[in-house]
Image (cartoon, coloured by chain):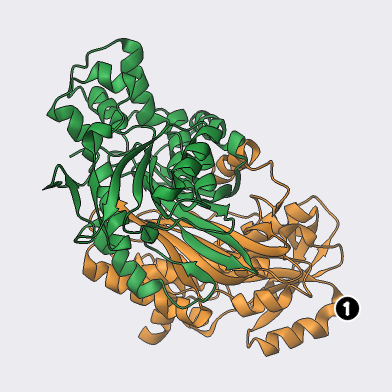
Chain colours: A orange, B green
Amino acid sequence: MSEFDLIARLQSALGRGRKDCVVGIGDDAAVIDVNGTRLASAVDTMVEGVHFLPGTSAADLGWKALAVNLSDLAAMGATPQWALLALSGPQLSADWIDQFTAGWNALAEPHRVQLIGGDTCRGPALSISVTVIGRLGANALLRSGAQIGDDLYLSGSVGDAAAGLALLQEKIPGAGSEAQRQALRTRLHRPQPRCALGVALSAKASAAIDVSDGLLADAGHLLRASGCAATLELDQLPVSSALAAVVAADQQRRQYMLNGGDDYELLYCAAPAARDAIASIAAETATPVQRIGRVHEGPPGMLYADGQPLQAKGWDHFR
Amino acid sequence: MSEFDLIARLQSALGRGRKDCVVGIGDDAAVIDVNGTRLASAVDTMVEGVHFLPGTSAADLGWKALAVNLSDLAAMGATPQWALLALSGPQLSADWIDQFTAGWNALAEPHRVQLIGGDTCRGPALSISVTVIGRLGANALLRSGAQIGDDLYLSGSVGDAAAGLALLQEKIPGAGSEAQRQALRTRLHRPQPRCALGVALSAKASAAIDVSDGLLADAGHLLRASGCAATLELDQLPVSSALAAVVAADQQRRQYMLNGGDDYELLYCAAPAARDAIASIAAETATPVQRIGRVHEGPPGMLYADGQPLQAKGWDHFR
């Protein structure tokens, strides 16, 4: 049974009943109402051998465990505030914790995220589960808000993290310089959640999702939730200079870009009338963004390029 | 390195920086301020082979994973509202999830707790991490509020869960009837968080903690946080009829009562002037409570009985 089926089952059995839950399970984060103030909250777990390679540094894990959760809040347009951490592993030493907290803090401090709950215990494999809570402004960015005719945008670039993982696993030799190959590995280990962009977009975008499972898979999630289809302009997809240097412009690179996970960019929609506003937001938040397609009628969740349907492949880190 | 040392390290490195965090790591739950409304939040993880025996039913795990977290909120005087769940395991089938959610809902529905976030993934051992968020009234019940001269109270009875675990592990033969032995196993698998009592106490008690690590250990935590010592009247400790029937009144039974974990009762303090109010709260919430000792000056965290110091043994489920 897939993760999505299991979560749907949890949602169906346990995810109802309170009017102060404005958005429940199924978006990037839940939205709850606290006497008129709206909070967003999400949980994400990383398990050794499933989400990260054994031997990944504690500092990188500290950064990434928080980053993937901040990315969920970014996709809702929420400002992160608090986090809770459940850590289990066979050997959690003081030294490991010190490195983990250093990596975490490198991201938490600029975002002013405070850890308010912690639980540690023994367990057979290293497992890191983080819950984040953030504050929303007037609008939450949902997956379900895309409108027919909207532009489809992507922040930054995709494919780098998958290429970085392939380098670590020695699946590809990798051209380019060592600095360029390192840049790809850093994209994998130290994703930059698009928090400022997400908050700014919450007033102008119609829908958003963060790209964690792969561009096609996550675009499919957004479009299914919105009941729309979309056409991508594949030649508009931005390619980072590192990816361009390390992986040749072939099918493999395209696979990384379309189906590679772990990039934690934002994919979002906005009306064509908002193009200037979207450009201003990109400039003000110093975030590269690219218009990569258009939302239209069609089978919900379907994606096309050059008139042909595109097939998403689920992102399973180590299969 | 002990769990307490690791958490202290997390708190010291990551647990500071926001004024809207009223109480951080170190109490039963954190307290955050949301535009004047106070929320309490806690996280707790259960790992197979560490916190529960392999083969424990999915329904019991669903109940208990939520119960231990509601108990943390009860100890703060907070009303539970929302929960997030991170599940990992080697085989999470639809059938297992259905049983898990049935057990969870048996507790969640009467408490009106809605699941607002869920994450599932593969992992080498079954691991269940739950974050809860609840609402506080005017006062949070802290561990640090005990005053010299306060009475010390305990809800329900302790030792049952440890005896139930010993029965499951066939460490003791167990006298009494099968129904009585089953009652002890049920205390282990289906703890009843003292939510109504905790909320009612928040206006009258000076300090509280939930008894998860053992009566002496948790009393020590409360007293250390309050800078006090206490004397227990051991002959006042309530013994459930099931424990009385199954385990003889010997050293073993006393060990279960003083150092056994997993009972999830509330241990709390109140001024002698509040005795009538405490009795009324017990009656109104239909919760058995017993005055079991008195807070006094002394080395912080020290416990005495009959003028002799008592030694807490940490509760490690399966050692």
B224 or B272, which is in the foreground?
B272
Identified by mark 1, the residue type is: Ala
Which residue is at a point 24% across and 34% down the rendered structure image? B257
Q: Is residue A213 left or right of residue A208?
A: left
Residue placed at 47% from the left, 35% from the top?
B62
Q: Position of residue A247 (x, y in %)?
A: 48, 75
The structure residue drawn at horizontal position 14% and vertical position 42%, both measured from the top left corner, is B306
Q: Residue furthest front?
A: B273
Q: Nearer the viewer, residue A199 or A169?
A: A199
Q: Position of residue A47 (x, y in %)?
A: 38, 54
Residue A213 visible at all: no
Q: Residues within 10 Å of mark 1 (few under 14, many from 20)?
A: few
Residue pointed to by mark 1: A273
Relative to B239, residue A108 above or below: below
Identify the image quadrant of residue A238.
bottom right
The x, y position of residue A306, in whole percent, is 76, 65
Q: Is residue A269 above or below residue A17?
A: below
In the picture, residue A28 is in which quadrant?
A: bottom right
Answer left or right for A315 relative to A295.
left
State the residue at coordinates (25%, 63%): B5
**Residue in front for this viewpoint, B182 or B258:** B258
Q: What residue occupies the far top of the structure in this picture?
A: B177
In this orientation, does residue A249 appear? yes
Q: Position of residue A57 (x, y in %)?
A: 31, 70
Who is closer to the viewer here, B78 or B117? B78
Q: Is residue A92 left or right of residue A64?
A: left
Q: Is residue A240 above or below residue B2?
A: below
Chain under label 1? A
